[in-house]
């Protein structure tokens, strides 16, 4: 397993903790936090969000799919216990679609001096927005603070009944999804640590999640990862379970995220299920690659 990531990426932290929870060995390629990413795009076909999981000539995009792929390959210990899985999925969706966006604006606006100088311009381009100046970022941070604090209190209320984990009596994907949003508060500096100071239950729970660790990473170069993909062969396509409106396997398709970072990836539909879309493509540098995406959050079209 090769994880393409960088240190202060919150979604990378989610993936690193999943690897740690499952006590997995993996190889680490540190990628730039901003475009261009010339050693990543041969593997992904243009997808540029972070992180990306590579296993041979198969590349998995988006932590919503990455964690499920880890679960498919290493089902124990599980992050999807059957009695909590539906609730955990709902909490994870809330955290990553309602909590993290204001959190990112609040934290970034208060840490401009320690972020890469072109990070905000890059993120604005990913969303099709003009580059913000410092005053714009400060105003966005102030507005977002008022959305962050009630949601931190909501996390505390989830733990108020004495449960050990966010969704109940066992660790789930919800713990990773909520944790990485709160981890981002102090990922670069401790300036906003006061936001968590009143919440002993949250701090104790975060310490337990942090104790999962990151497994056993070994650094390699991006060139090593590309060479491994080129020398490998994608896994055989799994059975498709298409919906009536879906393109059929073998069709030429284009896929892109439906919210931000909408760089398209084009290729041949290898297989499609209710949870996953796999695109086969041939890259002049990396060879034949199958790039995998979650179904939800992505727009798939034939062309």
Image (tube, helix red, strand yellow):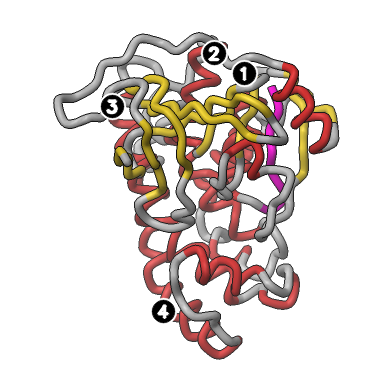
**Residue displayed at 44% across by 61% down:** 101
Give the residue pinned by disc 3.
86
Give the residue pinned by disc 1.
22
Residue at mark 3 to residue at mark 1: CA–CA distance? 21 Å
Position in image of residue 138 (x %, y %)? 54, 84
Q: Quadrant of residue 226?
A: top right
**Residue displayed at 69% across by 38% down:** 4
126 and 212: which is toward the camera: 126
Verify CB contact (< 8 Å) between mark 2 and mark 3.
no
Residue at mark 3 to residue at mark 4: CA–CA distance? 32 Å
Ranked by sequence position, the earlier of labels 3 and 4 is 3
**Around disc 2, counting alpha carbons within 10 Å, would you say few (fewer than 14), some (14 to 19), or many (20 or more)?**
few
**Residue displayed at 66% across by 40% down:** 42
Q: Is residue 112 shown left or right of residue 248?
A: right
Give me the disc on residue 143.
4
Give me the disc on residue 249.
none
Give the residue pinned by disc 2.
77
Ranked by sequence position, the earlier of labels 3 and 1 is 1
23 and 235: which is toward the camera: 235
**Around disc 1, counting alpha carbons within 10 Å, would you say few (fewer than 14), some (14 to 19), or many (20 or more)?**
many
Verify CB contact (< 8 Å) between mark 1 and mark 2.
yes
Q: Which residues are magenta?
A: 1-8
Residue 152 visible in the snapshot: no
SS category of the residue bearing label 2 = loop
162 and 185: which is toward the camera: 185
Up the image or down, 303 lies above or below 126; here it is above
Residue at mark 1 to residue at mark 4: CA–CA distance? 38 Å
SS category of the residue bearing label 4 = helix
């Amino acid at each position: 397993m090769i994880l393409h990531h960088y240190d202060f990426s919150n979604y990378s932290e989610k993936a690193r903790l999943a690897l740690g929870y499952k006590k997995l060995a993996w190889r680490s390629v540190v990628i730039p936090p901003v475009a261009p990413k010339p050693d990543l795009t041969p593997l992904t076909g243009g997808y540029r969000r972070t992180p990306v999981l590579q296993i041979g000539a198969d590349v998995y995009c988006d932590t919503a799919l990455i964690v499920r792929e880890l679960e498919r390959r290493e089902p124990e210990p599980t992050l999807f216990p059957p009695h909590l899985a539906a609730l955990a999925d709902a909490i994870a969706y809330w955290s990553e679609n309602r909590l993290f966006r204001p959190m990112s604006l609040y934290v970034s606006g208060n840490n401009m001096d320690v972020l890469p100088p072109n990070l905000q311009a890059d993120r604005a381009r990913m969303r099709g927005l003009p580059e913000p100046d410092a005053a714009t970022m400060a105003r966005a941070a102030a507005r977002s603070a008022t959305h962050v604090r009630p949601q931190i209190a909501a996390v505390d209320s989830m733990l108020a009944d004495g449960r050990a984990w966010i969704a109940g009596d066992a660790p789930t994907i919800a713990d990773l999804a909520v944790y990485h949003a709160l981890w981002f508060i102090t990922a670069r500096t401790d300036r906003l640590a006061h936001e968590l100071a009143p919440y002993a239950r949250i701090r104790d729970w975060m310490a337990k999640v942090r104790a999962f660790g990151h497994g056993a990473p070994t650094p390699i170069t991006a060139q090593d990862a590309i060479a491994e993909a080129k020398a490998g062969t994608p896994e055989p396509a799994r059975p498709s379970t298409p919906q009536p409106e879906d393109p059929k396997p073998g069709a030429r398709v284009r896929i892109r995220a439906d919210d931000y970072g909408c760089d398209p990836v084009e290729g041949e539909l290898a297989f499609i299920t209710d949870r996953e879309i796999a695109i086969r493509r041939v890259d002049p540098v990396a060879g034949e690659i199958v790039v995998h995406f979650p179904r939800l959050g992505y727009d798939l079209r034939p062309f």
